[in-house]
Image (cartoon, rainbow, N blue to C red):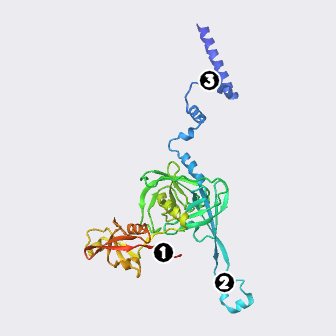
Amino acid sequence: MRRLWLTFAQTVTVCVAILFVVKTLKPEWLAQLPSSGTGLAEIATVHEAVPGADASRPGSFAEAAKTAVPAVVHIFTSQEVKGARHPFMNDPIFRHFFGDRFGEESQRRSGLGSGVVVSPEGYILTNFHVIDGADEIEVAHNDGRKYKARVVGSDPESDLAVLRIPADHKLPVITFGSSDTLRVGDVVLAIGNPFGVGQTVTSGIVSALGRSHLGINTFENFIQTDAAINPGNSGGALVDANGHLIGINTAIYSQSGGSMGIGFAIPVSLAKSIMEQIVKTGGVTRGWVGIEVQELTPDLAESFKLSGTDGALIAGVMRGSPADKAGIKPGDVLIQVGGKKVKDAQTMLDLIAALQPGSAARFTVKREGRDVALDITIGKRPRPPKE
């Protein structure tokens, strides 16, 4: 029995020694042995070997980005800017000896932004402030193709513009989604060229809808999002989880110049309507009656003996305007336009702008405690002067 035990111990010792030598000098021999384990390394290897595994990753929006990114372009602009005159140019003796060589000098100012290809004919939707004042506009695709672009038309009051590039190649086109069905909390992606670093996709959610009274545009109805939007993103696409266009990235709230988690986009429903007008007529036509209004505060409502703050206070009436001809007076409180209730000054502006110039509409005002109905022939809203 003792001899048997001694033989067993010697055998085990030799096997352990052989295993140690093999593991040290030839570990690949051990890797070829069959294994029944289910360690993490094996699971990761099997996962990587599964075809199409990326497409089913929970929380991934790679397919949405893949759908939308090709239709988002970089926009590079340049503008000639005249420099200041040399201070000695005001001296006639200096001009006599040196002529005008130190006179006004011009230089070119460059800018950048983004745009969205919305039609195979080469139409691109972007922000007005991206191309404002530019005398040269270049559009670059993410694949390196570059084109000279021309301005089809613009609408400064909504900060939208339409460009066109030659449709000599098959252009990737974005698919329009529905901004009217958006809900707070929906996932969105912002695509653009922030700071000129190149095509970038950021994600977030819809933080709020119908944002207005921000002082960014005359006509405001913004989608608010916390998807990172930075300088250079302007004019780029805000898309839903399917990669469909739901907004045009326009502005950020920032004290530093970078994203602070509050960005604003123009809803695609508004952008599409304005784009179609620009493509058809080269501009946007809105209704106008020639009144200046201000918000009704609780103090003002009390002084006018109103039951609430709904409505818009008429602060001024332009002489000879449609409102002046119809009999609207400063101090009136506008409460209805064409049978639709006026909630505040912004609502009033939107309601009047939606009316067709030349048509007639009934305006209802509060005057000295009673309702007064006035029929007004709508005029055409003048284009705002260039600053």
Tag shown at residue 86: 2
Percent position (x, y) of residue 135?
A: 63, 70
Camera sees residue 180: yes
Percent position (x, y) of residue 271?
A: 50, 61
Which quadrant: the N terminus?
A: top right
- Tell me the residue that label 3 is attached to: 34
Q: Residue furthest front?
A: 359
Question: In the displayed structure, does residue 116 sit left or right of residue 286?
Answer: right
- Tell me the residue that label 1 is attached to: 382
Disc 2 residue type (three-letter): His
The Cα–Cα distance between marks 3 and 1, rounded to whole angstroms, is 82 Å
Corner quadrant of residue 349: bottom left
Earlier along the polypeptide chain: callout 3 or callout 1? Answer: 3
Corner quadrant of residue 163: bottom right
At label 3, counting other C-alpha atoms closer than 10 Å, the crowd grade (few under 14, some 14-19, many 20 or more) is few
Disc 3 residue type (three-letter): Pro
